[in-house]
Amino acid sequence: MNGYRFIKELILQHHNFDMNEACKKLKDNDVEVYSVKTDAFVIDKSNLGKAREVLKFGSEIGEWRWSDKFNFPSKAFCKKPSNLCDITEYQNMTGEVKDEWNTDEIIDEHILNNKRLMIRGEVAGTGKSYICQHLQNRGYKVLFVVPTNNLKQECGAEAMTINKFFGISYGDERLEKFDYSGCDVIVFDEIYFHNVGKWALIWDFEKKNPDKIVLATGDTKQLKNPERVSNVISFEKYADHCINLIFKNNIMLYECKRLKTEEDRQKLRDVKRLIFEGTPFREIIDAYFKWTDKIEMYDNNIAYTNNTCKMVSSKIREMNNITEEYVINEEVICRKYIKTKGKKFNVNFRFRIANIVGDIVVLQNVATGEKQNIELKLLRKHFIYAYCYTAHSKQGCSVDGDIVIYDWNGWYVSKNWFFTALTRATDFNKIKFFKYNEGQESKSKRIVEQYFERKVLNYIEQDKKAGRDVEDGDYVDVDFLMNLMNTQCENCNEPLVIDFEDGKISSNITCQRVNNEQSHFKDNVVGYCVSCNCAFSDKIKTI
């Protein structure tokens, strides 16, 4: 129905092509072919010598042999033209939005009329999620299904992660499918974050729930989860193709509502074009933004590495004359999932310190108000001060105040990361970039390459020890691991990153084998964070 042929037919068509090519070679060399049957030609025995010169004879697969014992066909050989069948192209409908500032009009004309709708944004901050949230004001029970814990916390409506919604276990979490029967509208927010497997789950969910309004939002130019899906098509094109199959109807929003002025909106359009045309970041900053050569006392700073986040936060605390390790009402961010004494702390969730009693700290979730106790030693190990954030943790969020962006000059920073970082602001005049010396990279690329070289050697040793072949396949290499940076864990959607501290490098990037009987070949691995990889390994051992 969708134009794909069965594997068997593809093999047979390759065979037919090869037979036709061989037949042409024989005829071009004055060898008459009397008939063709499956994988055999009938020729005059006197032409066998010419056939040997034209075709490769031997005993190996794919080579030719001759036989004088043959059942001749009863019908004469003839060629028949093969008429290509007409394949109906999938029709995706893009609706025209008359006034994208009129939320009620969009809901009435596009959402309620179609029940299934993909809402894309040409730029960040177009109000995709706001439109979906507005359905609540119209009396609908709306549930947001989001890729990350941070977006769950930042969402202004009822929300849960996609793993919890579909009952996908990760880490040491064992989840059951969510009972969504009481919801009228399901919104798959930031759908480009997901991989092909989760798109398939969304597609299946849509087909099985005709009574629900199913919506999705997304933007290919922000941080995403690109899989190695093809060597002939870009991730963006492939992702668009998959999502268009799920959502026949879609709309595109062009105006950034997050920015307050038309001047800033035009600036955003110009900056986006320059970024993805490949203009150096320094040139873009020189033309459109401000520099700062010092750490500013702002609450909203964005960096790539956790180490930079820690450094900036420590400096700001020092400037605020905070000498205690932790103080009440100060905010912290969880950087590594932890479960202790029945309490869970999710990655990128923000907490406010509500109280400190000896070695016990009371943390209050800034979104829900829920209070949880944690030991001081675990707070030190798994949390950082909330004066500086990673761009991954801020995707989908708006920042009204001043912002300083760090780490923009690192070789590991992608165009998507740069675009995501600067589009958090509601006012471009409030964005500053930390000024590094020209040509200065924040960290050494060679250190990372050496780190991944050791990781590859460890994979090879693991496979050899387990008796798995490491030669007959395209084994993972440094470039493969480097390309996993700026992507997300295939299982839990948390960002895969590298980090630096005191000249040492650390990373949560691992390769999870799909088929555990096979080695770490590129077509047998997906990018997993360390937590999910360890949990998966423990699960295998248990089974």
Image (cartoon, helix red, strand yellow):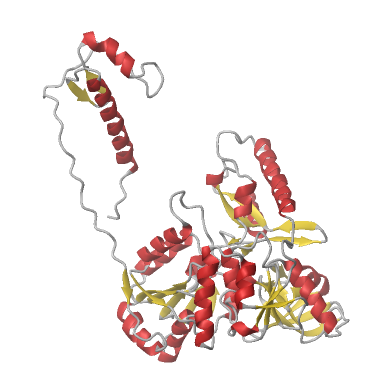
Q: Quadrant of the N terminus?
A: bottom left
Residue 167 visible in this rendered orientation of the protein? no
In this view, the residue in front, 223 or 464, is 223
**Location of residue 290 in the rendering, given as x and y in whole percent from the top left corner:** 67, 79
Identify whether 36 is placed above or below 531: above
Q: Is residue 512 left or right of residue 309?
A: left
Tally of marks: 0
In this view, the residue in front, 280 or 216, is 280
**Location of residue 398 in the rendering, given as x and y in whole percent from the top left corner:** 58, 82
- Tell which residue pokes out farthest to the left in this image: 75
Task: State the image quarter where residue 431 is shown.
Answer: bottom right
Residue at left offset 54%, top offset 88%: 260
In this view, the residue in front, 488 or 230, is 230
Residue at left offset 76%, top offset 61%: 500
Residue at left offset 79%, top offset 70%: 378
Task: State the image quarter where residue 72 is shown.
Answer: top left
**Location of residue 111 in the rendering, given as x and y in whole percent from the top left corner:** 35, 80
Residue 328 visible in this rendered orientation of the protein? yes
Q: Is residue 159 left or right of residue 208?
A: right
In this view, the residue in front, 220 or 204, is 220
Identify whether 536 is placed above or below 333: above
